[in-house]
Image (cartoon, grey):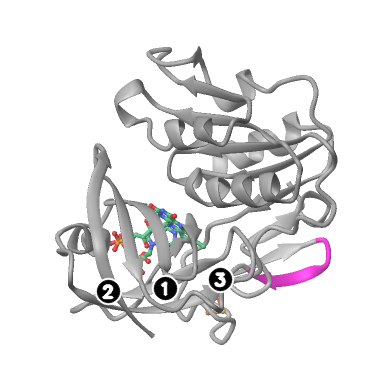
Amino acid sequence: MQYQIIENAQIAPNVFLLDVSGDTSMLKAPGQFCQIRLPGFYLRRPISVCDWDERGMTLIYKAVGEGTKALSQMQAGTALDILNGLGNGYSLDACGSRPLLIGGGVGIPPLYGLARALVQKGVTPQAVLGFNTYEEAFLVDEFEDLDIPITVATADGSFGKKGFVTDALPADYDYFFTCGPDPMLRALYKACRPSGQFSLEERMACGFGACMGCFIQTKNGPRRVCKDGPVFRKEELFW
Ligand SMILES: Cc1cc2nc3c(=O)[nH]c(=O)nc-3n(C[C@H](O)[C@H](O)[C@H](O)COP(=O)(O)OP(=O)(O)OC[C@H]3O[C@@H](n4cnc5c(N)ncnc54)[C@H](O)[C@@H]3O)c2cc1C
Ligand code: FES
């Protein structure tokens, strides 16, 4: 499917906000992702959808390797071939009455769309957003504009609480949703008592369930992160 870049702007060191116009009718739940084809690269790059409307969608990505660095050089007006609406996304069906959203770094973007969806549903989530340092923080103002309680944690203490997201968990939540680096997810699996949903990351090839390149073992047997996930319930995971 063809999309067009509206904006591709740096919002933090090596972190870019990519706004594209195009069909978003296949997006059904926050936490779904898309696969972007980049000229000269065989495999598409998976990136979570941060937010969307009928006009287009916003992605936030970190330039870490050759593909995302090439993406960061692309200008407004450029056409992009994107496979969209992939994965299951977060389920809002059983989200408790006081859900907590816990995000780390570029795991935070899909939680922004989720926060908006929860607010629209009449549920007020709290959020804990983790970064390494003040300069690397992004999306904090946007979360604050949703008028929900936010706690920021930075590893060096330069913004918000000093420490990791696990050092900044509130006492009063009855469900949680999370996305972020693998060590953070594993620490939360142990630290969070209520039930919750984890968005996992695996290296992907097809992105839609055909190649078995991204399977993990769960309590329900082998599952493909791209098709059966990327969001899994805490009870399904072995950690
Ligand atoms: C479901 C999902 C959602 C994601 N959402 C985001 C997001 O919203 N923002 C963001 O910044 N990043 C996100 N990532 C990570 C992002 O896909 C990688 O950073 C990106 O593919 C790196 O590509 P590269 O060419 O720059 O790096 P390279 O290291 O050159 O990539 C080489 C190959 O490894 C794959 N790869 C490298 N790192 C990862 C990784 N962490 N996860 C999966 N595949 C990887 C690449 O896709 C490529 O096929 C997501 C990953 C997954 C699986
Ligand atoms: S990437 Fe092909 S099955 Fe998941």
Ligand 1 lies under 8 Å from the Cβ of mark 2: no
Mark 3, secondary structure of its residue: loop
Q: Nearer the viewer, mark 1 or mark 3?
A: 1
Residue marked by disc 3? 214
- Asked if 193 appears above or below 31 in the picture, the reply is above
Mark 2, secondary structure of its residue: strand
Q: Residue at x 46, y 65 (%)?
A: 203
Q: Residue at x 43, y 45 (%)?
A: 106
Horizontal side, residue 84 vs residue 196: left or right: left
At label 2, the amino acid type is: Gln
Report crowding for label 3: few under 14, some 14 to 19, many 20 or more residues within 10 A (C-alpha): many
Q: Is 221 inside the magenta-drawn segment? A: yes
Name the image quarter holding residue 228: bottom right
At label 3, the amino acid type is: Cys
Q: Earlier in the sequence, mark 1 or mark 2?
A: 2
- Asked if 153 appears above or below 60 in the picture, the reply is above
Q: Which residues are magenta?
A: 219-224
- Asked if 8 appears above or below 115 in the picture, the reply is below
